[in-house]
Image (spheres, helix red, strand yellow):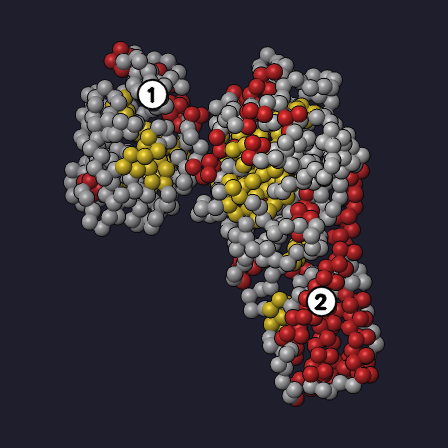
Amino acid sequence: MDLTGFRPIEAKLASAVIFFLLAAIPAHSGTDPKTSINEGLMAYYTFDDGGHDSSPYHRDLTLGSIRIGTGAIGQGASLRAPNAFLKLDTLGFPRNSESFSVSGWIKMDSFGPASTSRGLAFAGVSVVRGSGLIQFAFAIDAQGNPAFGTGAGTTGVPVGTVKALRLGRWNHVSVTYDGSSKMIRIYLDGVEAQAARIDKVGNLAVSGPWHPVFPANLDAEYQNPDPSGRLILNGDVDQVVLHDRALTPEEVRFLADRGLLAPPDYVVKFAPQLRFTKDSARWGYPMSAQTFFNALPKDANGVPIRTHGGGSVGVENNNFSTLRDGSIPTYFQERFIGDQVRINYWWFSGYQHECIPVLAPQSAHNGDWEHVTVILKEDRSGIAAVSYYQHNGHYTRIAGIHGPCSPAGTGRCDGSGGFDLDATHPIVYVGRIAHGNYHNTNRYLPGRDPNQPDPTECTYYGDIRDPRNSDDYLDSSRNLIDLDWNREPWIAKDRAPANWIWGPDESYVSTHPTQKPPDDSEHRVACEGAPTFLFASDGCYKSECIAGDDEASEDCLKECKPGYTNVGLTCNKGTWPWEWSVYGRLTGGNKYSYPYTLPRTDIGLTRRRETDQQWSDLP
Amino acid sequence: MMKAKASSVLIAFAVGAFSAQAKVNDQCILRWEQSLSAQMIGSQCRWMDTATRDKLIASQQASLACAVADATDAEKDDVTTLISESSRRIADSLRNVPCEAKARQFYDGEVQKASAPTPTH
């Protein structure tokens, strides 16, 4: 991005071009938002230099109790202290425009009670309600004119979004108002979330034409320090930009482009630590998908074309030092399901070598995508579950209490259950040949020659995972790339309906990671594959049940309903046998198979069912 | 990523399909628990003679056979695993059972059932 004319949104790419030199460019002189974004700029706060206004008008802010911290890009403003708000002084709009736009990034920790949580994010009165919906309110004075805080007891005309902000991550918000059409539009993350025509006061007791004309400032109600300390945003803002015109959708998207934006903090905090085998270099480490994509033959539209014949494209990463130099990207995609965040972390290997031992042999192929899904606790303080994927299945391990497991010492019952962490990072062991992901090691047997094939090495759990020490680890939080944006060109080409082949060889293996979001049908279930031991397709063999339930060999047995005592084979209510009310645990709805639908709350993942409702809601 | 051979996939499918049709008989499990409880009560209250004990044990064995008659091998393993757990928990729960009329009535009823023909599923 190159925002010439004023300090660029990605401030670090400072443009040397002076605003006034470009001010002569006619409004919307071209369709390129990189240049048109400069037109009508009235104020621009990056917070990299305190409250400095980087626009030509130098309308610097007095920050007061606002603290400067990590922003969406560079530094941002934390509004967590009581009465910390952006106090915008009266802004004169030289062109007397009746249109305007307010844009910026906002990240909230919580929304708080609907009646008290107000996010004083931008100019005008931008309100984040308890539901996380953005409202932009024009204050109306007693004569029905937009007053913007000039009169006490004014009432607002709010326009609100239907789609809520996402907690804990940076959201881009733009509000545009076009004076000629009287259309107000609110955009979230560059996409229009609400539009409304405001040509009347509506439900107010006053009437008449209404023309919002800047200068604007915050409603007086919000400008005065509040002794109750209500006015807390519980979050941060960054890159606040004011224009005296309505930005176009293209310009809003340009401002909202997250390509250079840091990933949400929880994506970094819970990014896996990959552990490779001491001789993994021979079989390939992850690498940039872009490097591989560049090497693929393509048609005139830049879409890869299928080539015939086998063999390697010749692009793989065998460089051991890349584990530590930060060059290996981890691609991620996050989705909210209610309050639950699910994150897919993906790694790309250029080539998967042939696995030829006796059982479940696998052919070689190019373009090997592997991933895990990390499910966070609803408050995002920790990890609730991790799903480990291979092309041929997956399994899930949970953080919550584990019920009795049988048969002991095998499959899912081998070990203490769950998954291991290094600080906040889930530990993921990577198979040396097929690059699949696992929760545990599978070390070389003593005396085993790594250069000689092992009969079981190509089976689902047979791939060797035997790291020497931390030299074989990859900290995937160092280089995270969001698959929902276009930081690397291949990402746009990967999205649906793209159906080209990542592995242009005889295997035609192809996974398009952008088309497999964490909330799709594949990721909705805990596992795929047989629940008992097989050689190749037994993903569920090491998958776990819902918290507290018995983990039997082929099924999960539900913990007993509230009021019932677990008697092993049955659940009994009543003290003595002649008083018992009994139901069996091995039949009907009291057991479920391992590919159950993953819970969308903490219940079942981090703690067991507690109420009748929870008992019936979960499998 | 793993690429499985077709034969392995077929094995998994076959096992899964068979599993869906099999089942454990809850009623027979319940019969087993009641008979076992009667045996424990009879022993603690000193109401049970050797012949009655043998009848109750035979009844329990028949109930278990009935319970797993249509079960898969894995389900049979599950039942086997849980039987010892169930026996222990029932014994714990009956440690202080009162040797009163209701207990006697329950015991007599179970002995009578044990004398009846073997349950079928």
Residue in view at x 19 percent, y 44 percent: A225
The type of residue carrying mark 1 is: Pro
The type of residue carrying mark 2 is: Ser
Q: Is residue B112 left or right of residue A518?
A: right
The correct choice, above or below, for A357 with respect to A588 in the image is above
Mark 2 closeness class: few <14, some 14–19, many ≥20 residues within 10 Å: few
Chain ID for label 2? B
Q: How many marks?
A: 2
Residue in view at x 56 percent, y 45 percent: A420
Snapshot quadrant of residue A181: top left
Q: Quadrant of the C terminus of chain A?
A: bottom right
Residue in view at x 78 percent, y 36 percent: A455
Dot 2 lies on which element?
helix
Residue in view at x 51 percent, y 37 percent: A271
The correct choice, above or below, for A325 with respect to B102 in the image is above
Chain ID for label 1? A
* Residue A115 at x, y percent in the picture: 30, 50
Q: Quadrant of the N terminus of chain A?
A: top left
Determine the CA span between mark 2 and mark 1. Answer: 71 Å
Nearer to me, A540 or A450: A450
The correct choice, above or below, for A91 with respect to B27 in the image is above
- Provide the residue designation for mark 2: B84
Numbered mark located on residue A474 in the image: none
Dot 1 lies on which element?
loop
- Provide the residue designation for mark 1: A8
**Would you say residue A158 is visible in this rendering?**
no
Nearer to me, A562 or A253: A562
Snapshot quadrant of residue B90: bottom right
* Residue A72 at x, y percent in the picture: 37, 31
